[in-house]
Structure formats: C-alpha cells, structure tokens
Amino acid sequence: MKIELAELTEANLQQCFDLKVSDDQMQYIASNEFSWNEAKENETVARPFAIYCDGKMIGFAMFAFDEDYEDPNDRYWLWRFMIGEASQGQGCGTAALQEVIRYFKEHGANNIRLSTKPTNTGALSLYRKAGFRDTGEMNDEEIVLQLDL
C-alpha cells in the first residue's frame, strides 16, 4: 500500500469534494469543501492535501503550521483528517496517518495536536494506536490529543 499526500489543484479538487464519510460519521467532520474554503481563509497556516493510496484518492487532510505561534505546543495541528467511506476498514487510515506523522517530522514539528469529540470512538482508537495521548485539555467540546515526535 503506497500512501501519498498531494497538493489540491483544480484537476483534483472536485474529486476531493466528492469524498464522503458514512452518515454516522458526518457529525464529527466538516465537509472537504468547507475545509478547503477554511484553508483559503487561513492561507498562512493551513496546508490542505488529498490523500492517495496506490494512485487513487481516498481522503483529505489539512494541517495547521504556525511557526510564529508563541506556545510551541500549539504550533502544529492535524486540523482535518478523513478517509472516504469506500476506503475505510482496509488499513488506509492507519497508513495515511503514518504518512501525516512523517510529513510533520520532516517539516520540523516537535509534536502534533488534534481535537475530536469524545464520542468519536473510531477516530480516537486510530489516533491512540498511533501514539496520540490525551492532554486533559478541551477545545470547545472536543478533547485535545498530542503526539510528541
């Protein structure tokens, strides 16, 4: 399984927007189109990517990189991470998350933070298996997890 992160372009943007999670997961994640628009509004820190597995687009990720942020624990966030419903349950999410972690390491991050609702048990299991740990902090109604690199 070869996972790649690729820039979103006019050529693949609609395909990314068409990726969906299952109905029961929709409460946990913004649409890829909404996230793309959010990235455009936050161009200095947002880094949106399509996730490919063996040449096929399977998901979307968006990172927040803010090297100027005063608190070093809040500089690097996995802001969005989704695997389309058709590619779930095949190890793609685990492999894609490892590629995301590699990206952060290669770009000088000392940790990665993310937040999700406490009821998002599938995502929490994935993140915890990858080494993310609860910080005890809350981000609105979401728990904050951190992976030290």
Image (cartoon, rainbow, N blue to C red):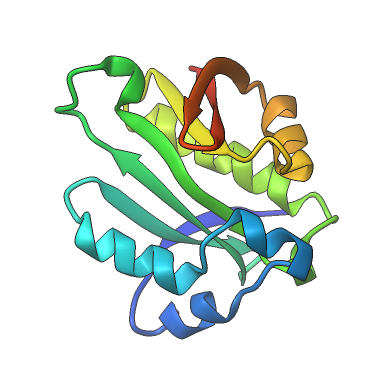
From the image, which quarter does the N terminus lie in?
A: bottom right
Q: Out of 39 and 30, give the one closest to the viewer.
A: 30
Relative image position of residue 116 (x, y in whole percent): 58, 40
Q: Out of 29 and 105, give the one closest to the viewer.
A: 29
Tell me which residue sits at (43%, 59%) in the image: 49
In the image, taking residue 18 as reference, residue 9 lies left or right, namely left
On screen, residue 109 above or below 25:
above
Farthest-out residue, front: 141
Relative image position of residue 85 (x, y in whole percent): 75, 68
Tell me which residue sits at (61%, 69%) in the image: 55
In the image, taking residue 55 as reference, residue 64 lies left or right, namely left
Q: Out of 137 and 82, give the one closest to the viewer.
A: 137
On screen, residue 90 above or below 142:
below
Count of numbered tags? 0
Tell me which residue sits at (41%, 63%) in the image: 35
Farthest-out residue, right: 89
Relative image position of residue 58 (x, y in whole percent): 64, 67
In the image, taking residue 90 as reference, residue 43 lies left or right, namely left
Relative image position of residue 51 (x, y in whole percent): 55, 60
On screen, residue 121 above or below 131:
below
Tell me which residue sits at (73%, 41%) in the image: 119
Quadrant for residue 39, please give it: bottom left
On screen, residue 3 above or below 114:
below
Q: Out of 131 and 28, give the one closest to the viewer.
A: 28
